[in-house]
Amino acid sequence: MVDTQKFINDAIHQIQEHSHDEKVIIALSGGVDSSVCAELASRAIGDRLIPVYVDTGLMRKGETSRISEIFGHIGLRVVNAADEFLDALEGESNPEKKRKIVGERFIRVFEREAIATGAKFLLQGTIYPDWAESERGIKSHHNVGGLPLTIKFSGVIEPLRDLYKEDVREVAEALGLPREIAHRMPFPGPGLSVRVVGKVTREAIEVVREANAIIEEVLVEKYQPWQCLGALVGLGTGVKDGKRLYGWIVSVRAVNSRDGMSADPLEISFQDLQEIESRITSTIPGVARVVYDVTPKPPATIEYE
C-alpha cells in the first residue's frame, strides 16, 4: 500500500525538478495512469502542461468523444492520427512489431506537437508492470520497449513508474479524480491492434471495436471485472442465413486481478454469455463464433498479444 499523500508531494516535486521550467506534453489517454499524471503535473507546473490525446483509430467505441468531454476543461489537444496509425499497421501480424509501430507513431505525433507548442519534455503514465514485463521479455509495452531509440525530447518524465495499478487508483482517489476515471478498466496502449490476433486490417479493427462495446455493456456494471475484452483469435466456419460462413472467432475474456501481474477468470453466468454471443453474431457481420476464455494469468497473459 502506498502512502498517497507522501507520493503526491514527492511526485509534484519530481515533475517540477525534472521539467526545468519548460513546457511539458502529457500523453493523456483518459486511463487512470495518464489521468493521475495529468492531475499531478497540473498541480506541479500549471499552464506549462500541454495535455495531448491521440486518436489512433484503435480506441474503444465512443472513446474519443468521451475523453474530449471529460478533459476539455484543461485545454486538451485532440490529434486525429487514425490514418497514420492504421496505414502503418496494415497487414502486420507480429505482436512485438505492432507494439513498436504504435510506440514509434505515438512519439512522432508528440514530437510534432512539441514543435508546435514549444514543449521540451514528455510526461508518461508508465507504471511498474509496464517496464517490468518489457524488461523480462513478456511483451514490449508501447511506452517502454516499444519506444524508438531516438526521440526529440530533452527527457521523459515518469512519476508513476514504481507503482502498481491499484496504487495508482488509490492516488487517483486521493487527488479527487472522478470514480469513472479512478476505477477505469485498463486498456492496452497499442489499442485494438493487439486484440486482433494476426494481421491488422481496418475491417478487423471495426469488428473487434463493436465486439468490445457489447462485451463491456453486458459485463462491466454487473460483474465489475478488473478487465474484460473481446479479441479476434482467428477464422472458423459457421452458418448465417442458411449459408456457410467462414468468419471471425471472437474470444471473450473477463478477469479479476490486483496488480495485473496475475489474474483469475470471472465466473460468468451462461445466460450472460449467451447474450454476448447472440448480440455479437447477430449485429456484427462476418462473426461466426464466440468463445469464453477461462485461462488464468499465468500461464496466459490478460491480453492476447
Image (spheres, rainbow, N blue to C red):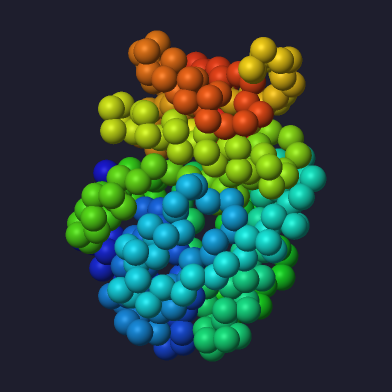
Q: What percent of the width, then of the height, locates residue 52?
A: 48, 71
Can you say whether 295 is above or below 207 in the image?
A: above
Vertical relation: 279 (above or below) 116: above
Find residue 269 and report its horizontal and vertical position in percent.
36, 13
Left or right of 113? Residue 40 is: left
Q: Is residue 79 above or below residue 304?
A: below
Quarter in which the C terminus is drawn = top right
Q: Where is residue 163 in the image (x, y as percent from the top left)?
A: 39, 50
Left or right of 38? Residue 1 is left
Q: In which quarter of the image is residue 69?
A: bottom left
Q: Is residue 209 left or right of residue 213?
A: right
Q: Residue at x 40, y 11 (%)?
A: 270
Q: In which quarter of the image is residue 232?
A: top right
Estimate the x, y position of residue 254 in percent, counting from the top left.
Answer: 44, 26
Q: Residue at x 33, y 75 (%)?
A: 74
Residue located 27% across and 44% down the image: 1
| Residue at 60% in and 85% down | 115
Q: Between 29 and 204, which is closer to the camera in this rendering?
A: 204
